[in-house]
Image (cartoon, rainbow, N blue to C red):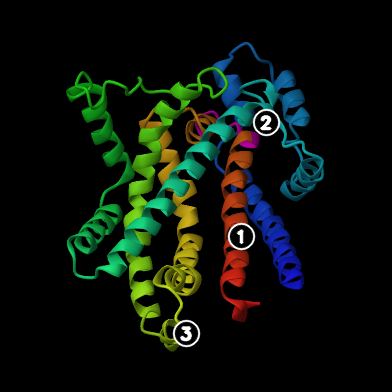
Amino acid sequence: MSRFLLSRLWQTLLVLLVMSFVIYGLIGLMPGDPIDLMMASNPGMTPEAAARLRAIYGLDQPLLLRYLHWLQAAVQGDLGYSRVHARPVLEVMGPALWQTTKLMLGGFTLAVLLSLVLGTLAALRPGGWLDGAVSTLALAGVSVPVFWLGEVVNLVTQSRLHDTWAFRWVPPLGYVPLLQDPAGWARALVLPWTTLAVLYAGVYGRVLRASLIQAYRQDYIRTARAKGIGEARVLLRHALRNALVAVVALFGLDIGALIGGGTLLTEVVFGLRGIGKLTYDALRNLDLPVVMAAVLYASFFVVLANAAVDGVQALLDPRRR
């Protein structure tokens, strides 16, 4: 197992290195010059001052040399300097990265818990009303865009029914610091978490339900029952463990859409100033170090999540080791 994990770690580092080179190259080839944009917004800037800024930011060097300098600094924890915010990139990204990560992890955790409950109950009573409800939720999750669902949730909870007893507790849109008000922090994130979870809970629950039904038809389940093992242990120890392999593999395919689409759109709809808003502002102002760090953040999570998926699958299924 340790040899498998070490091999997967080496592959992950190699993929991250290649992705950083590709991302840096694509961003470096973007049309437009940030120094020209600064000169347009500041008519008093002289060509000599612009040339000095271009040298400070390394824009007068070849693209490959700029990447090698960036990589050397990034290994030491320096992702560059934001010319718009006049601060290091890590200081600019820190609060936004923390908000996006909490939204993503909270929504995914809620989706996993809902899918485990709904998928298991639907598999135990196939053809029942709960089975149909899981299928409907899965269809809605695939069909409904997250920004539309978020806007509907805001319309109901912030406007139409906000004064009723059911939604009087919903706070205004925005983020509340955890240390300042833990209860307010939870209230501000529970609806974004739920909106994000609905997109995946039904699909994961449906896949888990199909995997459990197939697992219950296998010989090892009949053998376990013949040995007198209780139904709860048969479900948790044998059927569910094997059925989760398909769900974990599905998460590895969805993590890119979760980070690059669902999470960023959800934070914009609910007024959470995370990586999505920061990246949009950086692209508009050609703040290339911030754009590079934001894209690399999303890529890092995708690669890391897929490596974690491989590790979890190896734990669930010894044949993969």
Given the current orientation, which residue lies at the most extreme front position?
Answer: 228
Can I make out residue 29 in this image?
Answer: no
Q: How many marks?
A: 3
Q: Amino acid at mark 3?
A: Lys
- The percent position of residue 198, horizontal first and vertical second, equals 33, 48
The residue beneath circle 2 is 89
The residue beneath circle 3 is 227
Q: Earlier in the sequence, mark 1 or mark 2?
A: 2
Left or right: where does residue 316 sit relative to residue 321? left
The residue nearer to you, when weighing 107 against 61, is 107
Residue 281 - label? none
Q: Earlier in the sequence, mark 1 or mark 3?
A: 3
Query: Is residue 286 rendered magenta in the image?
Result: yes
The residue beneath circle 1 is 308
Picture quarter with the C terminus: bottom right
Please tell me whether mark 1 or mark 3 is closer to you in this view. 3
Answer with the quarter of the image where residue 47 lies: top right
Please tell me whether mark 2 or mark 3 is closer to you in this view. 3
Q: Amino acid at mark 2?
A: Val
Query: What is the secondary structure assignment of the residue under circle 2?
Result: helix
Disc 2/disc 3 C-alpha distance (Å): 61 Å
Can I make out residue 312 in this image?
Answer: yes
Query: Is residue 162 rendered magenta in the image?
Result: no
Label 2 Cα crowd, 10 Å radius (few <14 / some 14-19 / many 20+): many
The residue nearer to you, when weighing 6 against 183, is 183
- Relative to 272, does residue 312 appear above or below in the rendering? below
Query: What is the secondary structure assignment of the residue under circle 3?
Result: loop
Picture quarter with the N terminus: bottom right
Question: What stretch of residues is rendered in magenta?
Answer: 283-289
Disc 1/disc 3 C-alpha distance (Å): 34 Å
Residue at the spot 47% in from the left edge and 48% down from the top edge: 109
